[in-house]
Amino acid sequence: MRTFVVLICSLALACVAGAQPPPEKKEQGKKKGAPAGQVSQPHGKPVGKPQPTRTGGPPPRTSEYGKAKGGAHPTQMNKPAEYSKAKGQAQVTNANKSAELEKTKGAGKGKGKEQPEVSGQPAKPNLPAGGKPGKAGVAAGKPLKPQHFDLPKQPNTAKAPAVQFQQGRHIEGSENWQGQQYTVFRDYRSEWHDENWWRGHYHNNIVFVFGAPYYWNAGYWFPAWGYYPDAYYAWDGPIYAYNHLPPDQVIANVQSALQQQGYYSGDVDGLVGPLTRAALADYQRDHGLYETAAIDQPTLESLGMT
């Protein structure tokens, strides 16, 4: 029995002894010194790969240097991006400018839109302030070539009564007609002279219309009062000497032009009678001209005759 107990104890001791780890070797118990060229790591931190010590040349590239260098790359790459962005903004600005320019051009096109004119009625432009004519108020018509009309040899005095001579008569309202083209109307005064006086002053610049003498001066025809005491005149005043035509042909061309535009409904007779004078005044008023009711240069220019 004692022998059995001893055996059991021996086996237990053997098991306990087998479970313990073998004793460490003395070489492992000793700490190895850091080899030359290596830096020892502090206690408590994981041991990394040792960095070699350099004895010359540039300093080693540490992890911080790599970060700083790596951080510079985004900055340099952002510069072209920002430049492209700025360039793109400039293009947008230019595009906007172009759009504004096109918009401005479009506004100019809208200006050309006007209300259509009623057929058969003359256009009525805006008159200058005070009713005085200006360049904007005179609308030149289509060019009209001068024509030769076969006029009656005797005037129709029922439609164009004869006017009476008045010594020194001036044209009423002409003092308000401004401009060099109206000087001849402002300065006109009726004169009575005999045949010899007229011939002595105007020589060959005298023509006869319906048996009445007219003299030419400063681009206009005038009645030569007194040349023939019984001469017939339907109008006492200047008549523009259009295209070197005699007075009756000038009047006939004006009457024809006014007929075409619906202002004159009488006969083309070569006489400045009441109907012709009324048609002239209506046309001049509608076209921003002074209402001279006479055949003047601005009116013929507006009709496209000069």
Image (spheres, rainbow, N blue to C red):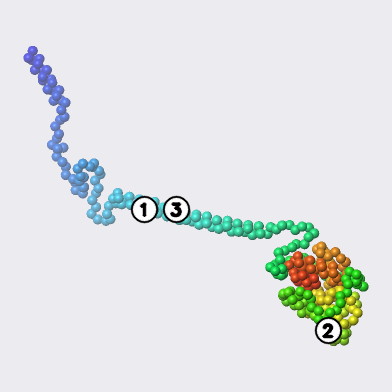
Q: Viewed as shown, does residue 61 lie left or right of 236?
A: left
How many C-alpha atoms fall within 10 Å of the one at disc 1: few (<14), some, or many (≥20)?
few
Q: 117 or 158: nearer the eye?
A: 158
Front disc: 1 or 2: 2
The disc labelled 1 sits on which kind of residue? Answer: Ala
Query: Which of the labelled discs sits on residue 72, or is there none?
Result: 1
Residue at point 27% right, 54% down?
A: 59
Residue at point 23% right, 51% down?
A: 53
Give coordinates of residue 45: x percent, y percent.
22, 42
Q: Is residue 88 visible?
A: yes
Of helix, strand and loop, which one carries label 1? helix
> Of callouts 3 and 2, which one flags the residue occurring earlier in the amino acid sequence?
3
Reply above or below: 115 against 303.
Answer: above
Q: Which residue is mark 3?
A: 81
Q: Which residue is mark 2?
A: 202
Residue at point 85% right, 84% down?
A: 193
Q: 148 or 122: nearer the eye?
A: 122
Quadrant position of the N terminus in the picture: top left
Residue occupying the far right of the picture: 154
The disc labelled 2 sits on which kind of residue? Answer: Tyr
